[in-house]
Amino acid sequence: MKRAVWATVFALLVVAAPITGPAVAASAPDDAGNSADDSPGESSAPSERWTRTLGGGDDDKLATGLKVDDGYLVVGWSNSSADDGHDDGYVAMLDRAGRTTWENTYGGPGTDRIYDVERVEDGYLVVGMATEESGEPWRGWLMKLGSDGEKRWERTYGEREAGAFWSVASSEGKTYVGGWQDDGGSAEGWLMEVDASGNEQWSETYETGRSGADEYVNSVFVTVDDELLLTGTTEGSSADPADAWVLRADGDGDVEWSETYGGAELDRVHDATAASDGGFVLAGRTASRGNGGEDGWLLKIGGDGEKRWERTYGTDKSDAFFGIHDDPDGGYVASGTKHVLGDAGADGWVMKTDAAGKRDWQRTFGENYWDKLWPVVEGHGGGYLAVGESTSYGDNRDGWVVRVGGPAVAAIEDADADESGTTVRFDGSPVRAVTLSDANVSGVLAVAERTDLSALSPPGDPLYAVTMNGTGAPEGSARVEFTVRTEAVEADLSDVRVAQRTGEGDNWSVRRTTVVSETNGTAVLAAETDGAGTLAVTDVPAPTASIDAAESVPVGESVELSADGSLAGNATLASYEWSVGDRSATGERARFSFESPGERTVNLTVTDESGLRDTATATLVVNDRPEVGVRTPDTATVGKAEQFSADVSDDVGNVTVTWTFGDASVTGQSVEHSFGSAGTKTVTVVVEDEYGASVSKDVQVEVRAQGDGPTTGTQTDADGGVPGFGVGAVLVSLVGAALLAGRLWG
């Protein structure tokens, strides 16, 4: 395993002692090694995205892996595929959702195991140990694989002595392998440089005084200055059974320094990685300090081998780190096994620290039995892939991978061509489901949450953002459902929307968003999006459209409609659209005129720069002018009530008729009035409708004093009638005149 600027480190260890005990708080000691609980636990740890087991019906293990273009390559060994009951080397390619793309086994009739893998330009180099026949000593094993897993060549080394390669590392065209080699019953460290065809360039061994090879040398990597670091465990005495051991050599294998670390009990280092300051961080286990039993152990040393700090972590039973990964943020991710199940078993353990070894978070993985993690590797889109072995998910031991953090992913299978779409559901993601418009797609759709929104500028107040991509990402429209915690929404839920970034930069389009459901403190929002990309869930209120205009307009006159009262929320209004029947206009103000009376419906739609819309509706009255005809007496007598009436014609609205008799006014379409003095009086009638249109008429009435004779009838307005006497009075006068003439001439 490789851990450097150009390479990463591998660690592998077969643990002989059982690990049991209840879980207690993980701890970190001060520089003297005294335990102190100084950090958070699983609540702040990234979630488990998915877990997979690999292998068959017998025991299988994974040793390490690496990130490749479309997924992950993992290596180890398998007993399930061997006919002779011995292990075969095992390599599998997984896609980003953990599905096996291909898998192969390698080796002969003996025991063959792969411990590490290195990516090269045209494929992969894997190393381990191999035996040609059962019972023969192990040999260092190096094999070249193509990108599809096909074996290109293989070589074994150490023909006279038993040995194995635990790690491979490359730098600037050079390849180094490291492990152990037996020397008459004593294990020695072993470094070798090989060329591109596996030919040995030089080989060196290093004495340490350890009598057994098992668990001895377990990592080698190239440092930033093209030197080598070899780590392992040395054998001590009954008073001090074992110590961690580190050797630094130059590119030709010449020793620069060698150091041991530990206390009076058993101390082992299983992996190492380069620190940014030129030093190294070692990971392993120690019984010399901590909570009791064995504890996970991190040790920081300088480039000269001098110890800088050390910390322990774990329970009062036996816990261990088997892998260490230098995180891009300057901290470290250690992995191994930790007791959480009492005597029943242990779980895989991943812990993140800062650059000083102070724990940021930790999480355990697994179920009922024994689960163990070796190293972690970088995950696609962030997070990690932890690699190891598990007995929790099958009848035997299986190879095991756990996706820790990073994007939520889901595998997309080919759907029926007649179906309208494929729905991909996610667990542990704010995106609950994505429905693809194209049913005939397959691959892996990944949804990564953007916890840092500082680099994005979506409209409104963003709650979070996600990015959808992958081989099955939608290219056309897709319905996306988001799960939102309602407690995180300070405004009205109806103002929470999905915005999609379009093109490069901070160009965003706010999508039409609906609330699908709301229950148990969460709400599900749905929006139609244009394929994959970056989506933000954001609190952005829609604009408010408002129409300002007169309530009515006379026929033939124009009215101005104004949108001055419209509001844009936290954006800017970009457009105004008016419609009145089949007529339309644009702009913040518009003018319309009408040739016939009646009510008109006015619509205003405003759109802000985020694409959000709102529509306001108002009713405009196109008003006609009332017409009036009046009926009044042509003469009246002082003190005698007379009838006054108005015939009104008006199509729109209600009217009010007001009569003015000098200094007295009365309202009504038909009224009575008596005059208090004689003379010619002007009567004014005013007709006004509810929208302000009016018409008035003036009528002259001759008022006689009492005793001056009867009134002579009524008069009408200019439309017709005889002023003075009425028709009946004229007829009576004519008859009287005829009778008088008969007397005079008879």
Image (cartoon, rainbow, N blue to C red):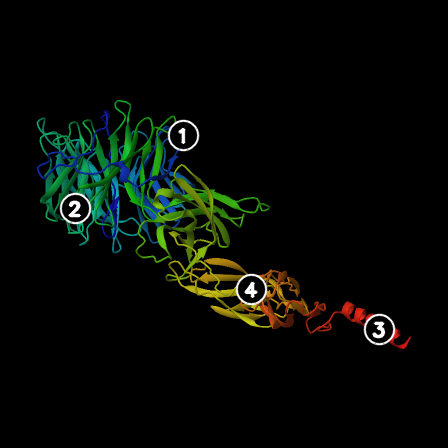
Crowd rating for badge 4 (residues with CA inside 10 Å; few <14, some 14–19, many 20+)? few
* Distance (Cα) linking label 3 and label 4: 46 Å
* Distance (Cα) linking label 2 and label 4: 106 Å
For discs 2 and 4, the disc positioned in front in the rendered view = 4
Specify the amino acid type for callout 3.
Leu
Crowd rating for badge 2 (residues with CA inside 10 Å; few <14, some 14–19, many 20+)? many
| Relative image position of residue 538 (x, y in whole percent) | 38, 52
Name which of mark 3 and mark 2 comes first in the sequence. 2
In the rendered image of this protein, does residue 602 appear above or below residue 357? below
* Distance (Cα) linking label 3 and label 1: 156 Å
Q: Is residue 683 left or right of residue 498?
A: right
In the rendered structure, find residue 543 and report the number of the disc placed on it. none
In this orientation, does residue 368 appear? yes
Specify the amino acid type for callout 2.
Phe
Name which of mark 3 and mark 4 comes first in the sequence. 4
For discs 3 and 2, the disc positioned in front in the rendered view = 3
The residue furthest top is: 343
In what element is the residue under mark 4?
strand
The residue indicated by pointer 4 is 665
In what element is the residue under mark 3?
helix
Measuring 69% from the left and 74% from the top, which residue is drawn there?
718
| Relative image position of residue 635 (x, y in whole percent) | 67, 69
Crowd rating for badge 1 (residues with CA inside 10 Å; few <14, some 14–19, many 20+)? few
Q: Disc 2 vs disc 1: Cβ atoms closer than 8 Å?
A: no
Q: Disc 3 vs disc 2: Cβ atoms closer than 8 Å?
A: no
Nearer-the-camera pick, 157 or 9:
9
The residue indicated by pointer 3 is 740
The residue indicated by pointer 1 is 83
